[in-house]
Image (spheres, rainbow, N blue to C red):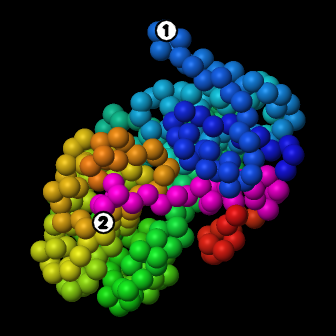
Amino acid sequence: MDDLRLIIGRSNPGLGEDVARHLGHKPTDVLLKNFADGEIRVQILENIRGKDVFIIASTQPPADNFLELLLLLDAAKRASARRVTAVIPYFGYARQERKDRPRVPISAKLVSNLIVASGADRVLTMDLHSPAIQGFFDVPTDHLISDLEFEMFVNTQMPHIAGRDMVIVSPDIGGVKRVEHLAQSLGASMAIVYKKRDEPNKSEAMDIIGEVEGKVAVIRDDIVDTAGTLVAAAKMLKERGARSIVALATHPLLSPPAVERILASEIDMMAVSNTLPIRKEARDKLMPEKLKVVSVAALFAAAIKCIHLEKSLSVLFKSREQLL
């Protein structure tokens, strides 16, 4: 893999460095600074002509993270890289992926267009808010699923709980497909929290479909932002007789007042991936007792290796043993 190059943005350097360690590959030197007015300055400090370049950058707010990715893509393309892959562990601006009311943008499509226009030849991401967003990119797009890592977490952290004593819960009807694989792998039953959402970041839990009484309820979601949905679902599950509640969420935005809500909630333990860096408030108040971090670095490293060697990624959806 002599012609593979890794470029790590500032949005999530911890994950990028972990991926590099799993690959046994030193990241490419890059200058990433801001001018006095805040404008982003980018320069790739090594020759990447003819190389297979992977740029690792999540696009969570502020918008500077997204703009930095675009500038890195443009710089790599203008430096004559053979192929440039945008590795986006958390794909921001994905929650407006359709025109569901008058006079709104389709943000996910606009952002996808900008990434491709900036020079991405390929995209690698994880747990999109809607899988259909893959079709918004006019370049090959690989969509990783974090279930294998969370399945391993459940098996190691809760080995005493048999599948029949566990119920995997979708916090809304739209997430049913997300919980199916995990429920099958763990031999657990499924439940759905039916809710009504009147506006973003505000939802009202309405009812539960499925049996949860006396079981360990494992809520599976893709994004935890202000944690309103998660906490409301946990409260209703407890009222319906769940004996303990665990939450699994891929992308830990944890915007205020998420930390306070989780601390005061019925959630006994919460696990998130490292697609995003954990906010300082969450680290200080939730870790390590209530909040656990599950690394997805090995999964991204394995996917990068498969792409670089022109191998199929399908095996990464079937067995954790195939990871690096």
Q: Is residue 156 left or right of residue 46?
A: left
Q: What's the magenta region?
A: 287-311
Residue found 25% across the figure and 41% down from its top:
256
What residue sits 62% from the left and 60% below the top?
299
Residue 187 location (% of width, % of height): 44, 87
In the rendered image of this protein, does residue 177 appear above or below residue 22?
Answer: below
Indicate the quadrant where residue 138 lies. top right
Residue 308 among those drawn in magenta: yes
Crowd class of label 1 (few under 14; some 14 to 19; many from 20; radius 10 Å): few
Q: Is residue 302 magenta?
A: yes
| 65 with respect to 205 (left or right) | right
- Residue 285 shown left or right of residue 111 in the figure: left
At x 54%, y 55%, the residue is 126
Q: Which residue is mark 2?
A: 269
Query: Residue 186: which disc?
Result: none
Q: Amino acid at mark 1?
A: Ala
Q: Position of residue 32 (x, y in %)?
A: 60, 23
Q: Position of residue 142 (x, y in %)?
A: 64, 55
Q: What's the distance in space between the residues labelled 2 and 1, CA to CA?
A: 43 Å
Quadrant into which the C terminus falls: bottom right
Residue 142 visible to an observer of this rendering: no
Taking the image as shown, residue 77 lies to the left or right of residue 205, namely right
What residue does disc 1 label? Answer: 36
Which residue extends farthest top?
A: 36
Q: Identity of the amino acid at label 2? A: Met
